[in-house]
Image (cartoon, rainbow, N blue to C red):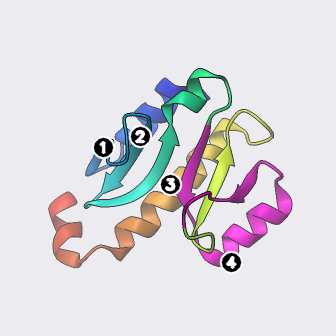
């Protein structure tokens, strides 16, 4: 997966906005004002891309046990966030599934009013 594919996939989801709330390197995608994906542009530039994605805690543990390329997310709640190293052992289609999972978790946590505004 390249940066353009990652960007377009995240941004194609309903109600998604992009932000740089921390610095000009940390690209954040939000739905309903809540973050579901975070990635360093610098890491993409140097060929070591990764993305932090929200994850169900039990599923997060399963993924970390099964894939070396999925680790607890740095500087985030490790029970609920994983860092997925892209272009290692994780196929692009699976990265997209993990993005979907993160988006869905965050979307479902939004109030019904905000959910209805998005859809």
Residue ID for mark 4: 58
Query: Mark 4: which secondary structure?
Result: helix
Query: Mark 1: which secondary structure?
Result: strand
In this rendering, the answer to whether 103 lies above or below 27 is: below
Q: Nearer the viewer, mark 4 or mark 3?
A: 4
Q: CA distance from mark 1 to mark 2?
A: 6 Å
Q: Nearer the viewer, mark 1 or mark 3?
A: 1
The picture places residue 50, in percent across and down from the top left corner, at 62, 41
Q: Nearer the viewer, mark 2 or mark 3?
A: 2
Label 2: few (<14), some or many (≥20) within 10 Å? some
Asked whether the residues under the numbered discs 1 and 4 touch, taking CB atoms below 8 Å apart as contact, a structural biologist would say no
Residue 119 seen in the figure: no
Q: Nearer the viewer, mark 1 or mark 4?
A: 1
Residue ID for mark 3: 100
Quarter that holds the C terminus = bottom left
Quarter that holds the N terminus = top right
Q: Is residue 69 left or right of residue 20?
A: right
Label 1: few (<14), some or many (≥20) within 10 Å? some
Residue ID for mark 1: 19
Let me know if residue 87 is in the magenta part. Answer: no
> Which disc is residue 27 wearing?
2
> Which disc is residue 32 wearing?
none
The picture places residue 43, in percent across and down from the top left corner, at 59, 31
Q: Nearer the viewer, residue 11 or 74?
A: 74
Q: Which residues are magenta?
A: 50-76
Q: CA distance from mark 2 to mark 3?
A: 17 Å
Residue 5 seen in the figure: yes
Let me know if residue 75 is in the magenta part. Answer: yes
């Amino acid at each position: 997966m390249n940066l353009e594919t990652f960007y377009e996939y995240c941004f194609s989801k309903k109600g998604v906005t992009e932000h740089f709330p921390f610095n000009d390197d940390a690209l954040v995608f939000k739905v309903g004002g809540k973050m579901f994906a975070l990635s360093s542009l610098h890491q993409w530039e140097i060929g070591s891309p990764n993305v932090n994605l929200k994850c169900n805690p039990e599923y997060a543990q399963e993924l970390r046990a099964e894939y070396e390329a999925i680790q607890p997310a740095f500087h985030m709640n490790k029970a609920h966030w994983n860092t997925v190293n892209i272009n290692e052992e994780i196929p692009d289609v699976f990265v997209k599934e993990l993005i979907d999972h993160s988006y869905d978790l965050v979307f479902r946590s939004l109030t019904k009013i905000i959910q209805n505004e998005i859809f």
